[in-house]
């Protein structure tokens, strides 16, 4: 009994932990190389850098998050913003799986200009998890008239107010057809042959 409980507890702990490989490269040329691994346990993420280093580059810096199934989610920023002060945000869906990522730097100037054209990629990386927020549906705003006052809703009509005219028309048609006499039938029948005329 105790062994079964411990096994189920270990499986639960393993199910709540996810591991993702983080790759990076400089564009327009370059292939992805591992930057490290991201461990997500109970909504908290930790980053472990890999031994492979990517030297300074120019152009665009691209980061890719590879999930267990091999799918790659990517994002890009200018190469001059790939530095020590970078932050990776992993957006997860309702099922807890990553849906998108965002890579930002804390030292981006307001005008978005680069101080240097190339910058070395740092070994440290702040990783955060962004869970979906609950979306509340709002009702439609009330209608107002020209004076700004809320319009009063029209009172609901009764059954006879809605359908009375149709019922009256139907009854009128039925009464016209019911009061008309049947058309006489002509011809035919041999009805009894009468005797001849009396003499």
Image (cartoon, grey):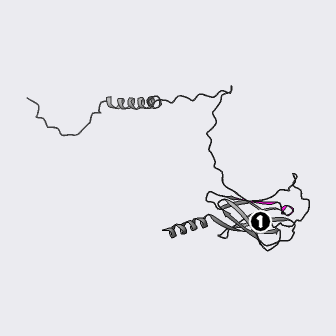
Rendered position, 117 above or below 31:
above
Quarter holding the C terminus? Answer: top left
Q: Is 84 colored magenta in this rendering?
A: yes
Furthest toward the front, the residue is 2
Residue 23 image offset from top left, x and y in percent = 75, 69
Give how far across and how far down residue 135 sits, in percent: 64, 48
Q: Quadrant of residue 93?
A: bottom right
Q: Residues within 10 Å of mark 1 (few under 14, many from 20)?
A: many
Viewer-proximal residue among 151 and 10: 10
**Label 1 secondary element:** strand
Q: Determine whether, in the image, residue 26 is placed left or right of residue 70.
A: right
The residue to which callout 1 is attached is 63
Image quarter for residue 146?
top right
Image coords of residue 115 (percent x, y): 91, 59
Q: Nearer the viewer, residue 180 or 91?
A: 91
Residue lying at 61% horizontally and 63% vertically, measured from the top left: 16
Q: Kindly indicate the quadrant of the structure image that contains residue 40.
A: bottom right
Q: How many marks?
A: 1
Residue placed at 20% from the left, 40% from the top? 189
Task: Using the image as rendered, state which of residue 10 and residue 81 is in the foreground.
Answer: 10
Q: Is residue 61 magenta?
A: no
Residue 79 placement (x, y as % from top left): 85, 64
Residue 6, compared with residue 134, is above or below; it is below
Q: Residue at x 35, y 32 (%)?
A: 177
Q: Does residue 110 lie above or below 38 as drawn?
A: above
Q: Residue furthest top?
A: 147
Which region shows up in magenta?
Answer: 79-90
Looking at the image, the residue that sits furthest to the left is 199
Q: Is residue 31 left or right of residue 172?
A: right
């Amino acid at each position: 009994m105790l062994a079964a409980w411990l096994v189920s507890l270990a499986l639960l702990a393993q199910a709540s932990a996810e591991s993702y490989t983080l790759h990076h490269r400089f564009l327009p040329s370059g292939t992805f190389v591992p930057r490290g691994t991201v461990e997500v346990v109970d909504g908290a993420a930790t980053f472990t850098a890999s031994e492979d280093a990517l030297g300074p580059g120019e152009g665009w810096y691209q980061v890719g998050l590879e999930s267990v199934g091999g799918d790659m989610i990517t994002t890009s920023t200018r190469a001059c913003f790939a530095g020590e002060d970078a932050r990776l945000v992993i957006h997860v869906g309702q099922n807890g799986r990553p849906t998108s990522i965002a890579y930002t730097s804390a030292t981006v100037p307001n005008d978005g200009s680069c101080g240097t054209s190339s910058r070395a990629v740092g070994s440290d990386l702040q990783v955060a998890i962004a869970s979906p927020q609950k979306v509340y549906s709002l009702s439609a705003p009330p209608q107002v008239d020209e004076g700004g006052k809320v319009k009063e809703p029209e009172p609901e009509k009764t059954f006879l107010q809605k359908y009375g005219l149709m019922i009256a028309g139907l009854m009128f048609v039925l009464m016209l057809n019911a009061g008309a006499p049947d058309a006489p039938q002509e011809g035919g029948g041999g009805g009894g042959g009468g005797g001849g005329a009396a003499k």
